Image (spheres, grey):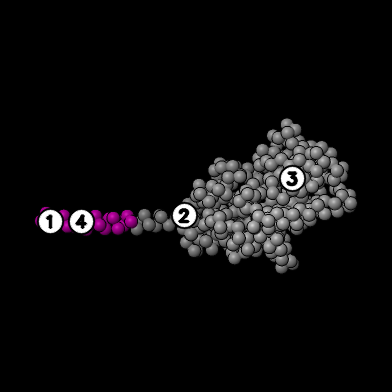
Amino acid sequence: MIRRQGKRAGIMLALGLALWAGMSGAQDKKIVLRYGDHLPVNHFLVEPMVRHWLNAVTKNTDGTVQFEYYPGEQLGKAKDLLALTLSGVADVSLIAASYTSDKLPLTAVAELPGGPDKACDATSAFRRIATGEGILAIKEYAPLGYRAISVVVLPPQQIFSRHELKSVKSFEGMKLTTAGGAKEIMLRKLNAVPIRMGAPEIYESLSRGTIDGGILATASVLSYNLPGPAKYVTLGENFGSTVVIIGIGETRWKQLPPSVQKVMMDAGEATGRNMCGVLDRDTGADYEKLAQRGAAAVRFSAADHREIAAKAANVQAEWAEALDKRGKPGTEILKAFNNALTAGH
């Protein structure tokens, strides 16, 4: 009798464990990912890009994928987010590629001065080479163990300044902040002094006079509250751009079910189209907002415009040649990007 009760108790225990395991397995299907970036919560990229992608992934996986959201450098500085993603501290992050130009030198092809005038043209071309079997995905991201999911190339960046800008000669000797890369080369060609600095640090430095200005998209000038200390912003020039990428480490990527991977990539493409559309639509309105907050638009003469464009073309050629000399396919990547631009028209 005791033995029979013991056997029955063992069966009940086994059934209980099986039921618990089934319930636990159902709960384990929920995937919680840590997402981090360097953006303030009111940044112009947050709603149409960051939240657009996060919400789309959660919705289109029926809530299977959820995110812990860490904005404003809570997981680490802007320059460290790529490394933190590769190491798994962040599962997914948004990076500004120019902050990690040492790790992503070829990605700067879409940030070169003199590039496309429209964000959507640049974004579409860049996605062709940066995702899937694109040359940049193969040559730069795969060796790092990194995967780009959603990409956006911002509209041409402008120079903002505390001092009046009358002509291209106004830049001579000015201390101008940049995230680095090709825009740093461009500033030197303008005889300015490039200062490498993350965007969250600019306001204080500009207010104190530590820097005279810098290169940013007009939307970023507004997002970082720079009108006030910044009195002038160029109009109609192209001093380069910024590539922003929502990406994931390959190790974490391979742990995700194929169905989730597909949702992420589909949402990434849709998010890129949404974000660049917002940027192209709103650029004109940015100058109205800048004027309302005390920053005047400056359009240079045709001669100055041609001089800036010629310097930008030289920067592109020098950028590609310098990478070629380092054993990296700079010329090949520049050609692929330009071909992707042509294919998009």
Identify the disc placed on residue 215.
Answer: 3
Q: Are marks 2 and 4 in contact (CB under 8 Å)?
A: no
Look at discs 1 and 3 and give the one toward the viewer. 3
Magenta range is 1-21
Q: Is residue 165 above or below residue 114?
A: above
Amino acid carrying label 2: it is: Ile
Q: Where is residue 339 drawn, in percent x and y? A: 71, 66
Residue at image location 20% in from the left, 56% down from the top: 10
Q: Is residue 187 above or below residue 281?
A: above
Q: Where is residue 124 drawn, in percent x and y? A: 68, 62
Nearer the N terminus, badge 4 or badge 3?
4
Q: Is residue 134 left or right of residue 188?
A: left
Residue at image location 73% in from the left, 33% down from the top: 210
Amino acid carrying label 3: it is: Ile
Q: Quadrant of the N terminus?
A: bottom left
Q: Where is residue 316 drawn, in percent x and y? A: 75, 56
